[in-house]
Image (cartoon, rainbow, N blue to C red):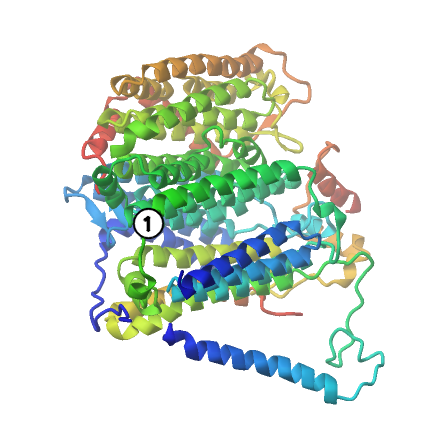
Amino acid sequence: MTAADLVIVLLGVVAVGAGVLVVATRQLVHAALWLVVSFGALAGSYLVLTAEFVAWVQVLIYVGAVVVLLLFGIMLTRAPIGRSEDLDSGNRIVALVVAVATAGVLVTTLVRGFRSAYVPIKDRVGSGSSHTLGGSLFQTWVLPFEALSVLLLAALIGAIVLSRTDIGGAGPEPEEEEPEPRRRPAAPRGTVARRLGTARRRATPDDEDTIVLSRVDEEI
Amino acid sequence: MTPVYMAAGDIPTPHIEYGRLAPVLIVLGAACVGVLVEALAPRAQRYGLQVLVSVVGLVAAFAWTIALGIGDQPHHVAAMGAVGVDGPTLFIQGTILVLALMSMLLIAERRHEDSPFTAQASTVPGSPEERESLVAGLVQTEIYPLVLFAVGGMLIFPAANDLLTMFVALEVMSLPLYLLCGLARRRRLLSQEAAVKYFLLGAFSSAFFLYGTAMLYGFAGSVRLSEIAAAISKQGGDEPLLLAGVALLSVGLLFKMGAAPFQAWKPDVYQGAPTALTALMASCTLVAAVGGVLRVFYVGLETLRWDWRPMMWAVAILTMLVGAIVAITQTDVKRMLAYSSIAHGGFLLTGVIATNKAGLSSTLFYLAAYGFTTVGAFAVITMVRDAGGEAGHLSRWAGLGKRQPLVAGTFAFFLLAFAGIPLTSGFTGKFAVFQAAMAGGAMPLVIVGVVSSAIAAFFYVRVIVLMFFSEPLADGPTVSFSPATATAVAVGAFVTLVLGVIPAPALHLAQSAANQLFVR
Amino acid sequence: MNLYVPIVVLGALALLFAVGSVIMGSFTGPKRWNRARLEAYECGIEPTPQPVGGGRFPVKYYLTAMLFIVFDIEIIFLYPWAVAFDHMGLFGLVEMVLFIVTVLIAYAYVWRRGGLEWD
C-alpha cells in the first residue's frame, strides 16, 4: 500500500462519513456544511487521482457555489435555523434499506468492472491538467461546450422570471407602483383598471383565481 | 515521473459543419434574440416582436431542415462527431419543428385571455401583487425565448452522437420546460406543484442518465455511441459495468418519454402545466425523447440487443397496460390524455424493440402522426372554457356535441385517432408499428398492444358518448373561437385525416428517411 | 507528487496565519463587552430586526446567488482555455467569445430590467 492509497482511503472515509452526517444531522444548516466536507474530501480524491482540474472544479463549483446556493435556499424558504425535530422522516428504515441496497449494487458493479484494471498513478501525472482538458474541450467537445452556454443563459432567465417581482415593472418605462399604496389599494387600483380597461367579470366563486379577479371587480 | 503534456502548438481547428447544424443554430439564435428583445424593447412591443422572432426562427429552421432532407449530400457525423445528421434525425427534427410551430399558435394565443401563461410568475398566488399584475394586463413574454431554448435542446437530443452531448441537450430541453410548467395562469398552485414534481423527478432521472454514462465510459473508454458499439462487439456483452450502465441510461431515457414504471410525473405535469405547454410537451418532447431512445438503442447498443430486449419488452408491456387501464378511472380531460400519452409511449417502444428498418420507419411515422393528433386535441381543450378557465373536468363536457357539434366532432375524431380506428392516422401508425414488431419476432408484444388498444378505445368512446348522448349542462362551458387555435385544430385534424386515408406518401417519406439507418 | 508541495506549503502557511492571528487577537486585544460588540455585524449599521418566526430574506439574494453561480461556471471554463490558449488558433478565441457573449445576453437582460438595482 502506497502513500497515495492510504490518502485516498482516508479521504473516502471522510467523504462517506460526512455524507452520512448530511442526512443524519437534525440541523438543516449543518447538513449543508457537512456537504462542504464531503465535497472537499471528494476533491481531495480527484487530486490524488491526478485529475487536478476536476478537483478545482469540485472546489469552486460545488464547495464554493452549490453549497452557497443551498444556504441561500435555506434562508429564503423560511426554513428553521437550529435544531428541528421534524427533519426525521418516518420512512427512515425504508430509506436506509434502499440506500444500502443501491450502494451495494453500484459498489459491486464497480468492483467487478474494474477489478482487473490497474493504472499506476505515476504514469498519469498531468493527464488531468487544465492544459489537456482545454485541448479536448475546445477541439473535440466544442458543440456540447457551446450548448452549455445556452443552458446557463436559459437557467439564468428562468431564475429571474421566477424570482423578481419588480423586474417586469421596471425597465424602459418608469415604474408605476410604489410600496405605499398597497395599504389602501382601492382608489389607485380602480383607476388603473378603468384606464386600461382590462378588468373582467367572472362569476363562479369556487376557483381561487376567479376570486382574485372578482374582488377586483368589487373594488371598481 | 514523466508528466504527460501535450506537444506544443498542435490543437487543430475543429471542423464544424455549420450547414448541417443550421436548424439547431437558427432556433437557439432566435432564442438569444428573444432574450435581447426582452432586454431592449419597450413593453408594448415585446409580445409582437417575440411572436415574430419565434415564428420566423422556427419556420427558417424547418425550411433548412427540408433543404437538408432534399439535398443529396451523403450523411455523416458532424461537429467533431458530436451530432449525427442523417435521414431519421432530419425526419425527427422536421417533425419537432412543425409541432413546435403548431404549439406556438396556442402559446401565443391571447383571444381567450391575455395569455395562457401567468401575468407575473414571481407573484404569490392569491396575493395583492398578483391581482395588480392581472389588472395591469401584464404578460410574461420571457416564455417565448424559453420555449425556443427547449425546442433547441429537443433538436440536439435525437441528433446527439455521444452521451455527453446528449446529456447537455437533455438539460437544455428540460430546464425551460420545468420552469414553464409552473407558469399557468389559472390554478397556479396546481401548476407550481406540477413544476416542482417534474423538476425533482427530472433531476433524479438526469442523475441516472449521468451514472449510466459514467459506467459506459468505464466500459468502453469513450462516450461516443459508435465506440461503445465497437467495444461491445469486441469485448462481449456480459460485463457488469456495461449492463449496469445500460440499465441506468435506460432509466434516464425512459423517464423522459414517460414509460412505465417511470410515468408517475406525466399525469400531474400534463394536468398542472398550461395547456398550450402541455401540447408542446406531449408532442415535441415525446418525439425528441423517442428519437434519443432510437439513436441510443439502434446505434450504441444494437449489438447488445439480445440483452436489452427482455427488459424493453417488460417496459413496453407495462407501459401499454398502465396507460390504458389507469386512464379509465380519470375524470380530468388533461389527465386522461396524459395516460393516453403513456400508452402511446408503449406502442412506440414496440416499434423500437423491432430493431429493424421497418421498426425505425414505423416509429418515425407513428411519432409524426401522434404528434399532430395530440396538439390538435390539446388545442380543442384550450377552446372549451368555463368562467374559471378551461373546463378540465370531464363532467363539464357532457352534451357538448349537441351545442357545439363541430368542436365536439373534431375532438371525437382526435379521440378515435388515439384509439386507432381505421381512416385515422392512429390506425396507420399502430398497424405499421405492430407489423414491424411482428417481423422482428415480438408477437406477444403485438398481442398485448392490440389488447391495450381495445381497453383504451373503451375510455375514448366513453368520452364521445358523454359528449354526444348526454343532456347538455345548463351552465355548461362555452367554446371560445380564435383564428390561431382554430388553425392548430384544423392542421391537426387535416393531418390526422390525410395520414389515415392516404398514408402512402408519408409512410414512403418515413421509409426513405429510415432507409440509411443512423450514421455512426 | 512533488508538484504539489508548494501548494501544500502555501496552504499550511495560510492556515497558520489565520489560526495564529485569531489566537494572538484573543490574547492581546482589549475586551470591552457592550451592546454594539454583541451585534452580529460590527459594521456600524443597525441590523434590521427580523419578524417573529424567522421571516424570509428578500428574494433578491437568490438572484445574486444565481448570477454568482453562473459566472462561477463560466470562469471555470476560462482556466483550461487560458492554459491551452497558446496552442490554439483563432478558433479558440472565437469559441470563448461566443460562450461569454451568450451568457452576457442574460446579464444584459438583468441589467436593463433593473434586476441589479438593490433599491
Q: Where residue A66 sits: x, y (%)?
A: 54, 60
Specify few, some or many for label 1: CA neighbours under 10 Å numbering under 14, 14-19, or 20 or more: many
Check the image and report above or below for B369 versus A83: above
Check disc 1 and give the amino acid type. Answer: Val
Quadrant of the snapshot with the N terminus of chain B:
bottom left
What percent of the width, then of the height, locates residue A142? 30, 59
Residue B477 is situated, as x and y percent measured from the top left of the image, at 62, 25
Q: Secondary structure at mark 1?
A: helix
Q: Is residue B112 left or right of residue B102?
A: right
Q: Nearer the viewer, residue A78 or B228?
A: B228
Q: What is the number of callouts on the image? A: 1
Query: In this rendering, does residue B423 appear at all?
Result: no
- Nearest the viewer among B294 and C107 is B294
- State the residue lying farthest toward the right: C34
**Residue named by callout 1:** B24
Q: Residue at x 47, y 58 (%)?
A: A9
Picture layout, residue B451 above or below residue B100 = above
Q: Is residue B418 left or right of residue A207?
A: left
Q: Quadrant of the C terminus of chain B?
A: top left
